[in-house]
Amino acid sequence: MARYDEGLTMTTPMFLAPHDQRADLIQVDRALDSMRDAGFDLTAAIGEPLDNSIEAEATLMRVRTIFGRGKKTIDRILIADNGVGIEPAKMHHVLSMGYSSRYGERKGLGRFGVGLKLAGLSLGERIDIYSRQTGSTKIYHSYIDLQEIREGKQHYITTDEVQEWPAEAAKLMTGRDETPFASGTLVVFGKIDRLSSGGTYGTSLDQKIAELRKFIARAFRTYIDTGRTIELDGKVTTLHDPLFLRDNPRIISRYKPLDPRGELIEETDLRIDGHKVHVAVAIVPREFRPYSGAGGGTDHKGHDISEFQINEDNTAKISILRNGREIYYDIVPRLLEGGRSDKVLRYVAIEVSFPAELDEYFQVRNVKRGTEPVSKLRSELREWLKAPVKQALKKVRADWKETEKRKRLEDGEHTETMDTAARVFPNFPRGIAGRGATPEDEERVVEQAVVDLGLDREEDAEKIERIREQIRTKPITLMGGSWPGKELLVIDHLNGKAAVKFNLRHALFDRVYLPLKKLADEGTQNLDPEEITDLARRAQTAVDHLLIAYAHAEAMYPDPERLDDLRTYWGMFTEALLREAFRDQ
């Protein structure tokens, strides 16, 4: 029975229930084992101690992975900083589930008091913390070990003084001049059993480390940009800003004296309960979206830029920051009109930044990698984003159109199409037609093109040389010409390459192609909607009749079955070319 004081408030029970009628509130060993599946992957797990380091005013943070034999496993991960350290009286509480010296606070990066513990235990069975406070020469140590808890060897978390930092971490706890940190903290995630290579669908450890570097660069960009340094396995991590508005040392060193930067389309502050939600829309640097079809994988010089995360996987992803730290980078359902259907969205960057006081409005979870605006806020964001996103997409396409027009003037009408073929055809077997063609045969094709195009050898010398170079280097060279007759085109096969001449007198070009080309070059300003619709229907009809004409042309052969391979190749190459040409559309 329970005992009550004079105010009828229950205090301690006078008699305890029998053992078979009471239970511990928590089965500690099983509870901690269950918590290992809290949703932390490597990136989220390492983010937690880095958050704590920033809270501790650290300016230098280091992450080091200790691999097992053959680099097939990671045995330990060390996270070191030069922050103010942890007060010895609180050290043992740091690893206690639910404890936080900033529990419930909305000013920093933490809040729930479970991050570090769940992060470490999601990877392995042991967490060690070593710390030296500012103004002290003593180093203190606390740990939690699931194996020892299961075996009944650890019942409490204690704090003990140690003589020095662990040997494998000694260099981590020094500055770049090798002067020991005056203060700092070392976190060791040990007995790791959930990071290994192998398996049919497994991700290699190298790839996981690469993803971790990308995560640190993006998630902590605000702090890196304001003077913090984060090293991963001895290499400084430079920031990655999806909007490309902050200084990126990798971009600066690679492209100097150029300064590729994103273009801010619009930004605003939405007011919610007296707090600001900052929203910004930008497009990536023009150098990283050089033409339609580049796909975000190459720059204006054709160099690989996959490290800058502009490819298809990043289409329509939103970067959401809480107190300056990114906690979400993914698609927010029902936020952007059309979702991922418009591939040009990969070049449009959207950043939403909010203070922790608005956690409930973003439904922030204790694992800092999940958030979703509540319905009313989502609607407000969606409505505001419509205009700047539309403007951003329009700007990207306008820039491409300008580039294409300039390139056509410089290189000829069909350069873009020939460039597409040059990217696609190396993936297919080389053609066997014209294998015996000689350089003299190529020159005869050039000479015939000069005649067909009516070029002057002196005035058009540069253009003639360009045609000669295209025929020599391109898998396909396209040229326009005019001649009497019913031929749609003439093809010269030259050692697996081909020079194709269109007959511009043919109805396909005269009635369909040239009007469409004029529309593409001049835009729709001088056309009414009915004329545009008529052109679209004309193009559709032309495609239909082109296929019908091909079918009837086959019927002129007594054995059209021998053309089966031709149909297969034609369809295969057409599909490959169109996929490449329209991959950003």
Image (cartoon, rainbow, N blue to C red):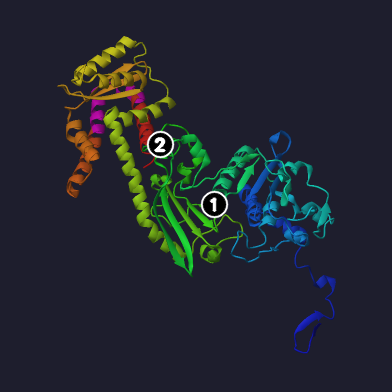
Residue 267 falls within the magenta-colored stretch: no
In the rendered image, which quarter contains the N terminus? bottom right
CA distance separating discs 2 and 1: 29 Å
Residue type for callout 2: Ala
Q: Which residue is farthest left?
A: 484
Does 402 sit left or right of 424 as displayed?
left
Q: Position of residue 563 (x, y in %)?
A: 32, 23
Res 131 seen here = yes
Does 41 sit left or right of 167 as displayed?
left
First to last magenta residue range: 546-565
The front one of 194 and 542 is 194
Q: Which of marks 2 and 1 is nearer the N terminus?
A: 1
Q: Position of residue 381 (x, y in %)?
A: 42, 60
457 over 108 or under it: above or below? above
Residue drawn at point x = 29 percent, y = 13 percent: 443
Disc 2 marks which residue? 294
Disc 1 marks which residue? 222
Q: What element carries label 1?
A: helix
Does 538 sit left or right of 363 as displayed?
left
In the rendered image, which quarter contains the C terminus? top left
Quarter location, residue 16: bottom right
